[in-house]
Image (cartoon, helix red, strand yellow):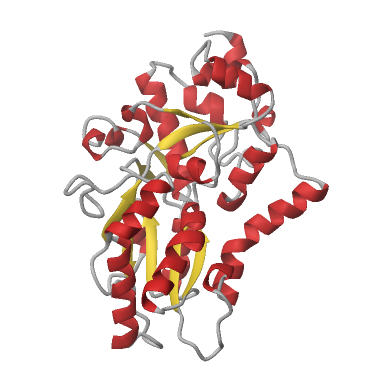
Amino acid sequence: MNARLTVNQGRTAARRPTGRAAGASALCMGIGAGAYLAGGAATGTLCAAQPVLRVCYAGSMGAVMERKIFPAFRGLTGIAVRGMGRGAFGLARELAAGELTADVFISVTSGPLKLLPRKLPAAPAVPIARTCMVLAYCPHGPATKLFRAAREPWYSIILHNHLLFGRTDPRTDPQGRSTILALKLAQRYYNQPGLEAKIAGRLENPAQIFTESSLMFRLQSGQMDACITYQSQAAANHLPFISLPRQVNLGYPEMDKAWYRHVEFQLPAANGKPQVCRASPLVFYAVILRDKARQHETRRHEARRFVQFLRSRACRRMLVKAGYKPIGGRRAGKPGT
């Protein structure tokens, strides 16, 4: 193997924002939490006494949820929605511990759903959309010309040119886990032993890891060159991307048995036992949650209406337009399958 393929972990560090860029990054990171606490700009000014449907969702869905789905649902039903978008594993842990309450939880992959106590879901989770992993890159700068010219494979462009690669935290975010798993699938598909370690460095590499809400901003502003992210997220942020093979991109349930389920990695756990992270198709699931302090039949009915809306033709059109793929009958499978 060419010695140039060995990348110093420090080389993959994304540039830190300064000045105006830092302020924009901080604003970007605060949108999800601020919307949940204050009612969200997309849902308008809410009266303190007005009941609000609380929805926790995978952070990558922030743009389509806050700008399209929540306003459309409120316009159709008159029901206001307050959203919280963050890494789905982190949200699931807070919901399980009672540190956070919600009426609906939207997860990407079934992994976060397995962290919820058995009595918390009020109904089985249902699939609403799917996506796949792509290699998104900065729309301007040296990396742009390299990826567009495509004179060598995408992974060689990253390694040979010491490009700055970013990702999210695999401990809290399904996208961070999917990035690692896609790299492992790529090293198998392209027959490139050690490719994942050469690009990502060590698993918990602070030089590469950023919050989900700031990842796209850093790519847009040129603070990093490339990342492996959801196609829906790249499309929502108008970023150029390179499609990955079906065997690598985690977007096709029919590839699960032959490819996806054959890769895994381990994360350290608080109890000392390593947590095994396995690949699974990138399906988004919605589940209605119970809340003993607040959830009554009216609230549950509103939550059911919201989940039904997520599966409607109108919402499906919004999701497809935002870069998501529709659920095709039985293809998505049930959570945990």
Horizontally, residue 126 falls left or right of residue 323, namely left
x and y, in percent, of residue 165 in the image: 60, 32
Horizontally, residue 52 falls left or right of residue 18, namely left
Whether residue 7 is visible here, answered yes or no, is: no
x and y, in percent, of residue 66 in the image: 51, 62
What residue is drawn where x is 31% and y is 87%? 298
Q: Write down the quadrant of residue 166 in the picture.
A: top right
Position of 211 relative to 136 (above/below): below
- Residue at the right extreme, as displayed: 19
- Residue at the bottom extreme, as displayed: 49
Horizontally, residue 214 falls left or right of residue 277, namely right
Q: Write down the quadrant of residue 290 in the picture.
A: bottom left
What residue is drawn where x is 69% and y is 35%? 222
Position of 223 relative to 301 (above/below): above
Query: As rendered, which of 297 and 240 lies closer to the eye?
Result: 240
Whether residue 113 is visible here, answered yes or no, is: yes
x and y, in percent, of residue 247 in the image: 31, 28
Q: Write down the quadrant of residue 105 in the picture.
A: bottom left
x and y, in percent, of residue 140 in the image: 67, 29
Position of 117 relative to 26 (above/below): below
What residue is drawn where x is 38% and y is 61%? 106
What residue is drawn where x is 76% and y is 44%? 17
